Amino acid sequence: MILSLAYRTWRSTDARLLWKFGYNFAYKGMRSVQRFKKRLKQGQIFPPFLYISITNGCNLRCKGCWMDVTSPQAKISYEDMCKLIVGARKYGNSFFGILGGEPFMHPDLIRLLEAHPDCYFQIFTNGHFITDEVAAKLRHVGNATPLISVEGSSAISDERRGRKDVLNKTLAGIEACVRNRLITGVATSVCQNNIDDLLSEEWVDELIKRGIHYVWYYTYRPVGPEPTPELALTPEQVLAVRRFAMDMRNSKPIGVVDAYWDDQGAALCPAAIGISHHIGPWGDIEPCPVIQFAGDNIRDNNGDIFKTMTESTFLEEFRNTIPAQTRGCVVLERPDLLKELVERLGARDSTARKSALAELQAMGCLSSQHNPENELPEENWIYRFTKKHWFFGFGAYA
């Protein structure tokens, strides 16, 4: 299936875009992880992968969204984004995830991509702002892959995302990406009202037919001002997500991402092992997008991101405390532990609404990917090898 995927991608994508992906993301990403592992041995943690929410603005109103999309729009300035990326590049980083809100509502997004041709960007988007003109610009810069969220059927999408005709607008964005020969992905936050429709072989076949190159399944986290915990998955359903991802890797010519299990099938939290952290639209440095508390900001230490992150007491205590309790998602499993940690360290609420601590206190305990009695080791040898040596795990919990 890997060869079939490679052939299908080669036929449907520009050679220049494939070169950018192979060199800027794959090769330089592996080198970045190697430098990360060397720093680990010295007791120094600076994540090789950074995720940046460049704006809180969004045209949708999704249930379970952690972002303050109803607040006045905030944007990280172009200058601050460039300083952040240049500072991270000094230590080997080449890959950056760009989130929102809706990233395409930031007026300097394309300009940012153009300014850093030696980096690779994954843009998490609902696809509504990707016209043929925008897709052509992405093709021209060549160093970004749109990851477009699809959350269910037309009716489910409208209900879940708080607007009308959501799915058709998203599919139009997908079609523009495919027409312009971009490396295109689809992401789904799997929950109770879409698991039957989207965690299916028929849906994967439909994505392949539409020209999608990879799919990312992650489990719903009921956070934010409208958490909707009844949409959260049961332990059996979370295990089904893992099993499905492995089956599709072995049978379909499409990449399948599941970032929350290592090569042996044990759960992992990228933030807890320090392989990735998140920067919010106000510049606050958070463990991950759904944990909206911070002790530091990208403008601290004159913008020296390496110094700020390697000397962060909050991030260090988070990485020391959470893995001792669970390999899974602390927001789902132990919101009480996270609340205690935030209060003990005096971490600030990094939201505009300033109610994140009360939301955390109101959360009940739910299951996450940590299920030690039912671990499913990776079956596909390429995924297993890659996860073991470069992208996840590599003994960090030890």
Image (spheres, grey):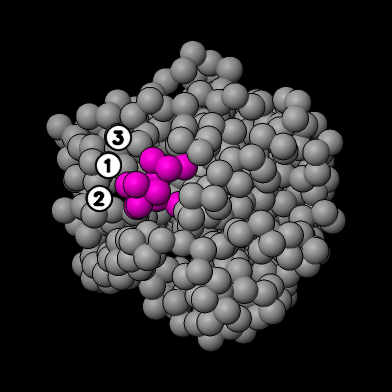
Q: Are marks 1 and 2 in contact (CB under 8 Å)?
A: yes
* Above or below, comparing residue 111 to residue 232 in the picture: above
Farthest residue to the top: give it. Answer: 72
Place of residue 369 in the rendered image (x, y in percent of width and height, measured from the top left):
65, 61
Q: In which quarter of the image is the N terminus?
A: bottom right
**In what element is the residue under mark 3?**
helix
- Residue for badge 2: 117
3D distance between C-alphas at marks 1 and 3: 5 Å
**In what element is the residue under mark 2?**
loop
- Residue for badge 3: 111
Residue 265: which quarter of the image?
bottom right
Q: Are marks 1 and 3 in contact (CB under 8 Å)?
A: yes
Q: Which of 151 and 241 is in front in this view?
A: 151
Region in magenta: 135-145
* 143 is within the stretch colored magenta: yes
* Above or below, comparing residue 171 to residue 262 in the picture: above
Specify whether 4 is left or right of 16: right
**In what element is the residue under mark 1?**
helix
Within 10 Å of the Cα at label 3, are there few (<14), some (14-19), or many (20+) other Cα atoms? few
Q: What residue type is labelled 3?
A: Arg
Q: In which quarter of the image is the C terminus?
A: bottom left
* Above or below, comparing residue 11 to residue 292 in the picture: below
Q: Which amino acid does label 2 sit on?
A: Pro
Q: Which of 204 and 216 is in front in this view?
A: 204
